[in-house]
Image (tube, grey):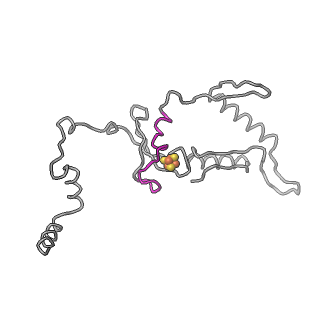
């Protein structure tokens, strides 16, 4: 036992965490890693992609993501090791975020049902944005109150509300809060808070 203790004691002086890690990566057991010539030259497909840090769009946990973009297209989405929330992990839903963006069945239009109509119409997103802006403006003009019944300044409207969802990130929520409060809206709510 004393011999072993001396041996391992001496050995530990030469071993560092880095050298152990290098050895483990380069070996299978005690045999050097049997990488073929071709394998040695292979590179990950994200090696020349640009990486953008983002937040998983699905739920309020807000796990960090790394989005890899090449030639203007998302080619991969992975967990972000630097995220203090998730430390590089993503749940099965977050791991599948790529297919939310790159998916030929992705919905790119909006459904619109006109007042008193029974059928839905397919409309472009730009059309919907324009209509929302017009309705927002008209409703605010019609319902904005500068003072309450006692003459106290209130400068608000309770006729317009905003309900956000978990797919909104910090930056979007910041802009929503700033913009809607500046319009005098007070009914601003979000399903998830990060
Ligand atoms: S990876 Fe999963 S747990 Fe994390 S934010 Fe996305 S959906 Fe939520």
Residue drawn at (69%, 28%), measured in percent from left and top? 112
Q: Position of residue 142 (x, y in %)?
A: 82, 40
From the top left corner, tell me how far across and down residue 22 is, in percent: 21, 54
Give the residue displayed 62% in from the left and 26% down from the top: 124
The prevailing secondary structure element of the residues shown in magenta is loop
Q: Please state which of residues 130 and 5 is positioned toward the viewer in this rendering.
A: 5
Q: Is residue 155 left or right of residue 58?
A: right
Image quarter (top left, top right, bottom left or bottom right) of the N terminus: bottom left
| Residue 78 in magenta stretch | no
Q: Residue at x 50, y 36 (%)?
A: 100
Residue 18 pos. (x, y %) = 23, 58
- On screen, residue 46 versus residue 164, left or right, reads left
Outermost residue, bottom direction?
A: 2
**Residue drawn at point x = 72 percent, y = 46 percent:** 183
Q: Which residues are magenta?
A: 82-101
The C terminus: image quadrant: bottom right
Q: As rendered, which of 53 and 96 lies closer to the eye? A: 96
Establish if 143 lies above or below 101. Answer: below
Q: Is residue 99 above or below residue 17?
A: above
Query: 79 or 169, which is in the foreground?
Result: 79
In magenta stretch: residue 91: yes
Residue 85 left/right relative to 34: right
| Residue furthest right in the image | 149
Q: Is residue 4 left or right of residue 157?
A: left
Residue 119 quadrant: top right
Horizontal and vertical percent position of residue 144:
80, 45
- Asked if residue 23 shows in the view, the reply is yes
Label total for image: 0
Residue 55 visible? The answer is no
Task: Report the residue that reaches farthest toward the left.
Answer: 3
């Amino acid at each position: 036992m004393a011999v072993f203790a001396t041996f391992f004691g001496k050995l530990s002086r030469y071993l560092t965490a880095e050298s152990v890690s290098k050895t483990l990566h380069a070996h299978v057991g005690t045999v050097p890693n049997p990488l073929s010539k071709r394998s040695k030259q292979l590179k990950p497909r994200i090696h020349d992609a640009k990486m953008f840090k983002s937040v998983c769009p699905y739920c309020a946990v807000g796990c960090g993501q790394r989005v890899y973009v090449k030639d203007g297209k998302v080619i991969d989405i992975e967990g972000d090791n630097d995220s203090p929330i998730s430390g590089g992990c993503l749940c099965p839903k977050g791991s599948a975020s790529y297919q939310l963006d790159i998916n030929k069945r992705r919905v790119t239009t909006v459904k619109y049902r006109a007042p008193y109509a029974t059928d839905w119409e397919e409309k472009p997103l730009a059309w919907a944005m324009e209509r929302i802006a017009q309705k927002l403006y008209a409703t605010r003009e019609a319902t904005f109150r500068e003072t309450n019944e006692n003459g106290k300044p209130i400068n608000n409207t309770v006729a317009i509300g905003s309900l956000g969802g978990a797919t909104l990130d910090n930056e979007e929520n910041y802009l929503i809060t700033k913009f809607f409060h500046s319009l005098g809206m007070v009914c601003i709510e979000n399903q998830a808070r990060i």
